[in-house]
Amino acid sequence: MADAVDHEGDLKKYCASADAAHISAIRKYLGIALTKKDSSLVSCSDASELARIRDGYAKKKLGLSDDKAIDAAIKNVCAAMKGDSSKSRIAFYYLLAQETGTLSNLG
């Protein structure tokens, strides 16, 4: 497991009141992706990864459809997490759902 990544600790830096049920839903959605350190992190400098987040998580899980709006939200989350060289995928996904007002779509 990717124990070196403190997902909840990373998220609490940005959202102290993060909801445990939403965190759990994201953890369940990501499943096996969290088992390796590399896949448990997001690289904002990798355009193909950000496109996968848009086309997979944002569209399929969050129910969003406007590519420009999704890309703008992803850009905002990248800017918010700019100071972290290791961006937790759970924190990134939570902040993206929060940014787009779709936390309730997590289940």
Image (tube, rainbow, N blue to C red):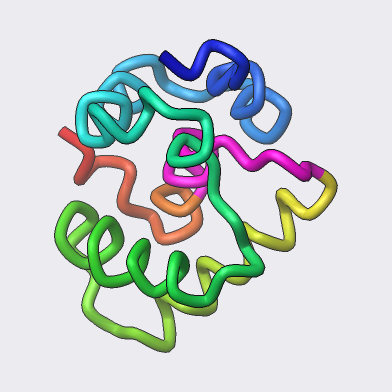
Task: Indicate the quadrant containing the C terminus: top left, top right, bottom left or bottom right.
Answer: top left
The stretch in magenta equals 84-95
Does residue 82 lie above or below 11 as drawn? below
Residue drawn at x 18%, y 52% is: 61
Does residue 54 lie above or below 68 as drawn? above
> What is the quadrant of residue 10 in the picture?
top right
In the rendered image, residue 73, in percent from the top left (x then y), is placed at 51, 69
Residue 74 versus residue 86: which sits nearer the camera? Answer: 86
Residue 92 versus residue 95: which sits nearer the camera? Answer: 92
Task: Indicate the quadrant containing the N terminus: top left, top right, bottom left or bottom right.
Answer: top left
Residue drawn at x 34%, y 85% is: 67
In the rendered image, residue 5, in percent from the top left (x then y), is placed at 59, 21
Residue 90 is inside the magenta segment: yes
Residue drawn at x 46%, y 68% is: 50
Horizontal side of residue 6 vs 82, given as left or right: left
Residue 20 is inside the magenta segment: no
Horizontal side of residue 78 vs 30, given as left or right: right
Residue drawn at x 46%, y 53% is: 96
Does residue 96 lie above or below 88 as drawn? below
Task: Tally the numbered discs.
Answer: 0
Does residue 62 lie above or below 41 as drawn? below
In the rendered image, residue 102, in percent from the top left (x then y), is placed at 31, 52
Residue 92 versus residue 102: which sits nearer the camera? Answer: 92
In the rendered image, residue 43, in percent from the top left (x then y), is placed at 60, 56
Q: Extreme bottom residue here? A: 68
> What is the quadrant of residue 66 in the picture?
bottom left
